[in-house]
C-alpha cells in the first residue's frame, strides 16, 4: 500500500504507538536535533501538525515512526554510485 508523504498513520487506540510525545522526546528520537528543527519539519509538512494538550504541543508516536519509515523508503530509492 502506497503512503503519501502528507498522509499520517495513527495506531489503534491504547497501543504504545498511539501515545503522545513532546517535542523534546521527538528531538531525541531524531538523533538529538533541536526542538526548533522538529518545528521546521512540521512547517515543511514532513511531520504533522501537533495536538495541544493544555498548552503543550505533542505528536503521536505513530506519526514519528511513520516519518522514520518514509526516510527509510527514500534512502532505499536513492541509487548507489559504483
Image (spheres, grey):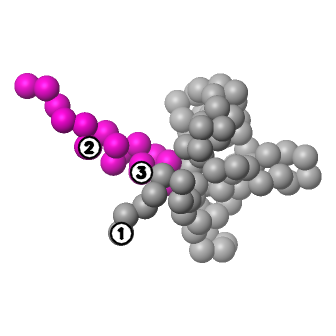
Q: Residue 69 at x, y = what percent?
A: 42, 51
Question: Magenta residues, as a range?
Answer: 66-82
Residue at which label 1 appears? 1
Residue that appears at 57% across and 68% down: 11
Residue that appears at 64% across and 41% down: 42
Q: Residue 64 at x, y = what percent?
A: 56, 49
Name the element at disc 3: helix
Residue at which label 3 appears? 69
Discs 3, 2 touching: Cβ within 8 Å: no
Tell me which secondary structure the magenta stretch mostly adopts: helix
Task: For the C terminus, give its image quadrant.
Answer: top left
Residue at which label 2 appears? 76
Residue that appears at 79% across and 46% down: 57
Asked if the stretch drawn in magenta spans residue 67, the answer is yes
Mark 2 vs mark 1: which is more N-terminal?
Answer: 1
Name the element at disc 2: helix
Amino acid at each position: 500500500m502506497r503512503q503519501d508523504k502528507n498522509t499520517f498513520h495513527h495506531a489503534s487506540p491504547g497501543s504504545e504507538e498511539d501515545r503522545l510525545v513532546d517535542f523534546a522526546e521527538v528531538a531525541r528520537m531524531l538523533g538529538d536535533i533541536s526542538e526548533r528543527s522538529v518545528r521546521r519539519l512540521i512547517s515543511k509538512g514532513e511531520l504533522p501538525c501537533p495536538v495541544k494538550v493544555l498548552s503543550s504541543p505533542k505528536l503521536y508516536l505513530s506519526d514519528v515512526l511513520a516519518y522514520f519509515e518514509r526516510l527509510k523508503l527514500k534512502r532505499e530509492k536513492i541509487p548507489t554510485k559504483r
